[in-house]
Amino acid sequence: MVEDEIEIENIEIQLLLQAIYLKYGYDFRNYAKASIKRRIHHRMNKEGIESVSMMQYKVLYDVAFFERLLLDMSINVTEMFRDPNFYLALRKFVIPKLREQSYIKIWHAGCSTGEEAYSMAILLKEEGLYDKTQIYATDMNEVVLKQAKEGIFSIRKLQQYTSNYQKAGGQEAFSNYYTAHYDHVVMDKSLKENILFSDHNLAVDGVFGEMHLILCRNVLIYFNRDLQNRVIGLFFDSLAPNGMLCLGSKESLRLSEYAYDFDYLARDEQVYIKKNDVHCPRMPAQKEIVE
């Protein structure tokens, strides 16, 4: 009986995701099933909804409810200079290659509320590269994009952000980059000058052309294998020759169809560089070997 109930709920979830896609255009159908199920159950508990089918009805007829659900479904875990060792690797391996460009184009895919895009802006300022850089920071969620554009963050997070910045090789006082107002801080407006925040859905939208650096950290872990390959292909097509790709610490290209199209630039931090020969034959995705 329990197995039947699980199977029925799985069908309900498929129908819910299809309804979201048809009604609003957000495509969660190829997200990792376990992650999606957790997020749906979280919203059901919050709203006192008894079944996924009831949630589908509310999604179709209650836009405000859908917007709350969308915040749950989106991946919005971020912080300034998250994983300081990654930013040390950027300074050591990536910045020297960016210096070779007369004009730099960077894409932060899945930027959430913008903390990591602002972190990149700070790093580039300290390395003397910000004035010749355009940063494209994208997310599918308009609510978090609005927060990112405002550049306003809780002052309660500043202790952690300051610590991260210092460990990431920060060269100034972190307080130089924001203004404090009671319970929040506002990032310096100079950091926003070369950041363009815009809507982009990795599951369905197209290429950002000729990027020198793409960052998409700890997003692919929420996608199933088919969607991972689609997104990595999107990044491959969006990178200039010798362009660089940064993934999260728990992500890798090793099992993807594009594993042979990149070399490691910093293995521990999952920083890759696109090979010069962009016409190499596509390799089938490998299967994980379980010993």
Image: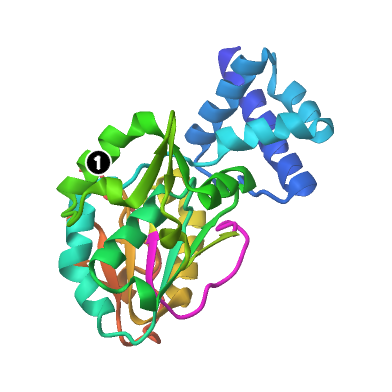
Asked whether residue 255 appears in the rendered view, the answer is: no
Q: Which residue is mark 1?
A: 162
- Which residue appears at 22% of the width and 54% of the height? 86
- Which residue appears at 38% of the width and 83% of the height? 103
**Can you tell which quarter of the image residue 186 is in?**
top left
Left or right of 158, for residue 227: right
Residue 202 covered by magenta stretch: yes
- Up the image or down, 24 lies above or below 73; here it is below
Residue 208 covered by magenta stretch: yes
Count the marks: how many? 1
What amino acid is labelled 1 in the image? Thr
Which part of the image, by quadrant, shows the N terminus? top right
Left or right of 214, for residue 289: left
**Can you tell which quarter of the image residue 134 is in?**
bottom left
User: Depth check: 257 or 113 in front?
Assistant: 113
User: Depth check: 147 or 262 in front?
Assistant: 147
**Residue farthest toward the right in the current orientation of the protein:** 61
Give x and y (percent) for residue 104. Answer: 38, 78
Left or right of 1, for residue 230: left
- Which residue appears at 59% of the width and 36% of the height? 71
User: Depth check: 227 or 109 in front?
Assistant: 109
Looking at the rendering, the stretch of residues picked out in magenta corresponds to: 200-215
Q: Main secondary structure of the magenta part?
A: loop
Give x and y (percent) for residue 214. Answer: 39, 66
Asked whether residue 147 appears in the rendered view, the answer is: yes
Task: Identify the image's colour scheme: rainbow, by chain, secondary structure or one colour.
Answer: rainbow
